[in-house]
Image (spheres, grey):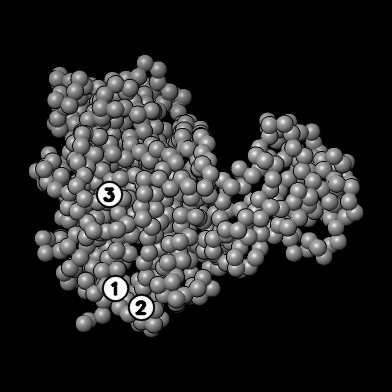
Amino acid sequence: MPEVLKAPLVVEFPFTRSLGPVQSAFLTGLRERVVLGVRTTDDRTLVPPVEYDPVTAEELRDLVEVAPTGTVTTWAWNHEPRRGQPLDTPFAWVLVRLDGADTALLHALDAPGPDAVHTGLRVRVRWAQERTGAITDIACFEPYDGDPAQPGGHSGRFEDMVTGIVAPARLDYTYSPGRAQSAYINALADRRNVGERCPSCRKVYVPPRGACPTCGVATSEQVEVGPHGTVTTFCIVNIKAKNLDIEVPYVYGHIALDGAGLALHGRIAGIPYDQVRMGLRVEPVWTEGARFPDHYRPTGEPDADYDTYRELL
Amino acid sequence: MTREIAVVAFAQTDHQRTSDDRSEVEMLMPVLHEVLDRTGLKTADIGFTCSGSSDYLAGRAFSFTLALDGVGAWPPISESHVEMDGAWALYEAWTKLLTGDADTALVYAYGKSSPGSLRDVLTRQLDPYYVAPLWPDSIALAALQAQALIDAGETDEPELATIAARSRATDNPHAQLRGPVPQGDYRVRPLRTGDCPPIGDGAAAVILAAGDRARDLCARPAWIRGIDHRIEAHSLGVRDLTDSPSTRLAAEKAGAFERPVDTAELHAPFTAQEVVLRKALRLDDSVRVNPSGGALAANPVMAAGLIRIGEAADRIHLGESDRALGHATSGPCLQQNLVAVLEGDPR
Ligand SMILES: [Zn+2]
């Protein structure tokens, strides 16, 4: 078996999220160095605040200011900070119950080492230099041996409320396509199209994914298909995609390579877009160094008879 | 009269650190064939198919649709998917069978954790406003729970090491970690390497059947006497991390407390979580807990909970248990919990 193919795959997305009235007030408050909680009907104060009571599901809107000082309720020493975490030096994860709150907030605690941390430790907020209205406006907590700070009685109404956050996320993967697709991609490097035949229904899948979706069994027998094929259906693309270096209009089609049991996708060129038709015989055009055909062009053969590809539509 | 529904077959892969020579469907398909072979059923005989998996593990949208190739989804089948552990897919299939819409169901789940960094990937299931922007990883959150238990005097590090050692002293041939495994250094204190589950790839499948159909397909069906799942507040600071009221409530609703169980398969990815679950489920030393090794021996994410129910059912199939409990969890610090109570016919 040839070497397993691998490639980096980065999934990155800036999630833009809107805030309801409670989250908006809380995050705007952080921007202004004010910590807000929300009061429940049984007079508990939840920090961070939520819009609905986790016990009764009642809507909550009664914002109250709490102190930026508090007590650690549990902790965990993180000696190897990971990307995106609040501090890049060893720190403690902490749940902190702020003075005036009945629930705890998760954040980081900057401390010299695990021996300096314990449940019950008094801490205070260390504000970020630049604050935008996000949980990261709290840079972290730090140990604090003074008196509880007195909250200012803020109403939760600010000018210029934060109404949304952008939460960027990035995850890194090493993608492996598996046995069947590796064989397909390796064959493409030699400009060959290799499918796999289902041992049960004899259909040839290209690209192969390792299984016949009709029979639910592994496909195994490799079959070379093409290089010529037949256009089974197509569409004319009139809108230019971002970062795509192809003039519109162009034609995107389904192409049944000779010997294949289903059609694959490809761009059709080398012919005016309005002359592409079902049954057109085409062949792949490779460009230097490419790992897959750039497009398909007419071979000049007579059009295929409809009956030869009707099952592949 | 409600229908009697049973787990009649169970299969799982050998769980491994990596399976980069196989795609998801290539990893899953042998398990599907094995579980069908156990019953003699073919794909066309299955009334309902339901699966559990996560796009965030695969790093691709709608990744479960590719796995469907291994089921034989043409001509069209009745199918559903949960973006969760397969135990919740089993719950959906169970309700489908209860309605009488189907007599048999295939439930499968799979997870390939190896392509990504699981600790980071799992941060994306957290509250996106207050928590996820801080990227607290799965071990960190479990460590907060462990410290809370230690502070409450409910466990200590030596007891956690005992749970780790007992779990991996299993003879389960599918387990990723077996035999003596050093506790190792702190990953996030107070949790050491040994307190954490292995990261790995794997898949599992079960077949459910109703009434006489179950008796036809299995010599000793594992009847689902009750199944229930409950969830707790998503904010960690609202919860008492030393307890699991959602597990207790799910167990009560599933009938777990009506009579003692002899076996319990608990989905506790971290040692300290077994302490919480034993208390919530009122399991004393007379109950065999995790003879399979549990999630500390193999933790294919999205399949590990379904495997607990499958392992519990298999003890009944083999006559080693008469009344077994299967538990699955999802989310940080045991946020969501499912409990199934399984029984064999009297002997
Ligand atoms: Zn086939």
Location of residue B291 (image quadrant): bottom left
**Marker count (numbered):** 3
Relative horizontal placement of residue B280, taking residue A221 as reference (left or right): left
Q: Is residue B162 above or below residue A270?
A: below
Q: Position of residue A77 (x, y in %)?
A: 22, 30
Q: Is residue B84 visible?
A: no
Mark identifier at residue B177: 3
Badge 1 marks a residue whose secondary structure is helix
CA distance separating discs 3 and 2: 30 Å
Instruction: Give the secondary structure at mark 2.
Output: loop
Residue A268, percent from left and from top:
79, 43
**Residue denoted by label 1:** B317
Eye-nearest disc, 1 or 3: 3
Would you say A208 lies left or right of B211 here?
right
Q: Looking at the image, is mark 1 or mark 3 earlier in the sequence?
A: 3
Q: Chain of mark 1?
A: B
Q: Please name the amino acid that badge 2 sits on.
A: Cys
Question: Where on the picture, by quarter, is residue B123?
Answer: top left
Q: Is residue B199 left or right of residue A312?
A: left
The residue at which mark 2 appears reads as: B218
Q: Are marks 1 and 2 in contact (CB under 8 Å)?
A: yes
